[in-house]
Image: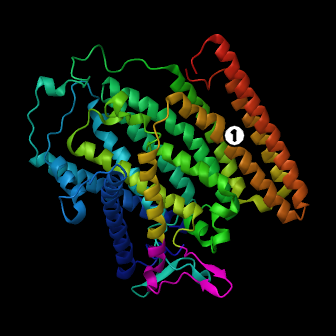
Amino acid sequence: MSDFLRDYLTVVWFAATALLLSGLLLGISAAIRPNKPNYEKLMPYESGVDPVGLGWSQSQIRYYVFALLFVVFDVEAVFIFPWATQLERYAGFGLVEMGVFVFVLLLGLVYAWRKGVLRWV
Amino acid sequence: MLAIDVLLDKIDLTAVLIVLFKVVVVFIIGLVATMFMVWFERKIISGMQNRIGPNKAGPFGILQTLADGIKLFFKEDLLPDRADRFVFRLAPFLAFVPAFLVWSIIPLGGDFTNGKGGAIKIFGRYTLVQLADPPIGVLLLLALSGIAVYGIMLAGWSSGSKYPLLGSVRASAQMVSYEAALGLSIAAVLLVAGTLSTNGIVAVQTSLSKWHVVATGVVPFVIFLIAATAELNRPPFDLVEAEQELVGGFNTEYSSLRFALFFLAEFMNTVTMSAVIVTLFFGGPQPLKFEQGSLHFNGNLHLGVLNGTVWFIAKLFVFLYIYVWFRATLPRLRYDQLMNLGWKVLIPASLGWFMLLAAQRVATDNNWNKWAVSIISIAILGVCGLLLMAATRASAKNREREGAMF
């Protein structure tokens, strides 16, 4: 196994420990806690009155639009991170390239802004 | 790379024991730090509000979290009728496990003097005081904070109830918005450090002037602090669980130990995010050194292998305190203000500063005229900033004409 993977293996061990602990706690708790469900207890909470309609109601489209916009910036991170660590190697050429890239990216943001997507209310 | 090298290649008992020992120790430190943070926050905030706070369980009420945990342990666990049963059960794990995993890549101590790279000697072997040092530690950090969104998102969605659903859509929009700014301010650190490994990032911050908070200019640090607070859903960005609007937010339908897991994950995230700030910007376990004339201090507290850990904890405390301070001082933002701050201020500012920093560094490397580069880049940034401000003002005026309230 390469050096590269070994450290991840430890992270996996750690994740397993965390999973194990939380699973164990839930298991022990399930064995000793009381369990007397009834209709009122299992109703969705709606400030004490009977719930109206389904819980999965529709929500604003804006949340979705922001998620889409985020994808743009996440893709950008894919380019920026490797470049940032190798700045010296690409020097001036890389700088100009990145400048152009960031400019295009900002154009996208400005376009969204102009379209009123960033306006919440 | 010393961290886990010992594993697998030459499997011997000492090596496996060291890894096991580290996993257990780091895990316990994580749990204890979380429990401590809950108590610390309650105690400090009660001090700021002229109350006494928890004072019954143990000295100064320090065992309060444990008492609460035991109470939750014996509580009935309700699974709402309308919930999606599988996802409802899965969500607490998705929140809890990533919160813990971040802890594994933080350098918790070590000896960084004279280029030792943070290795200390235990059981006759050199090892890092850090569970794992993957070469792309910072990306792992970002990935884990991305998974943490799923925990909150799915918890709210699967409850089949209105308040949790609202809380979770708010959470996902808020967290992805600020993740962009968070990533860009980390990119500024990477620019200076030149590595993605957390151990490497700490190793280059040898003196106060090389701490990234100074080396990157203070702007990325400020942006990171704001974005991190928003990522954590902590006040003043706690719209996800705004009690006055959403009852408990995404965890309204959760009870008993499942709720406890969310609660722990939240505080765990606060502790790890403070640790990340210390690592990225304040030199992690690197001691604070200064030399002023005859007065000089090399940061050695004569504690042997614990020297780095003590420095790390001291710095960690500052940020834990700052988070509590935020909560006590700042009123909650309105949702549109939150989005405006994220998209219209933090993202352009961090991108601009990132390019400025890159230009500066390339100029230094190639012996270009530093002043010319600075002036040109500041001029470009200034023009962009003015354009942005003009656009914001114009749009505000337009909307006022349309009769909007704000």
Magenta stretch holds residue B212: no
Residue most extreme to the front: B50
Q: Position of residue A28 (x, y in %)?
A: 15, 52
Q: Which is more toward the observer, B380 or B392?
A: B392
Residue B194 seen in the figure: no
**Could you tell whether B212 is left or right of B123 in the image?**
right
Q: Which residue is drawn at 14% across and 43% down?
A: B75
Q: Is residue B310 left or right of residue B265?
A: right
Q: In this view, does B93 lie above or below A69?
A: below
What chain letter is assigned to the residue under label 1? B
Provide the residue span drawn in magenta: B286-311
Q: Mark 1 points at which residue?
A: B348
- The verdict on residue B291 being magenta is yes
- Residue drawn at 47 percent across, 34 percent down: B172
Return the x and y of residue B122 as percentages of the image width and height: 41, 84
Which one is in front, B51 or B398?
Answer: B51
Q: In which quarter of the image is residue B10?
A: bottom left
Q: Position of residue B257 (x, y in %)?
A: 22, 46
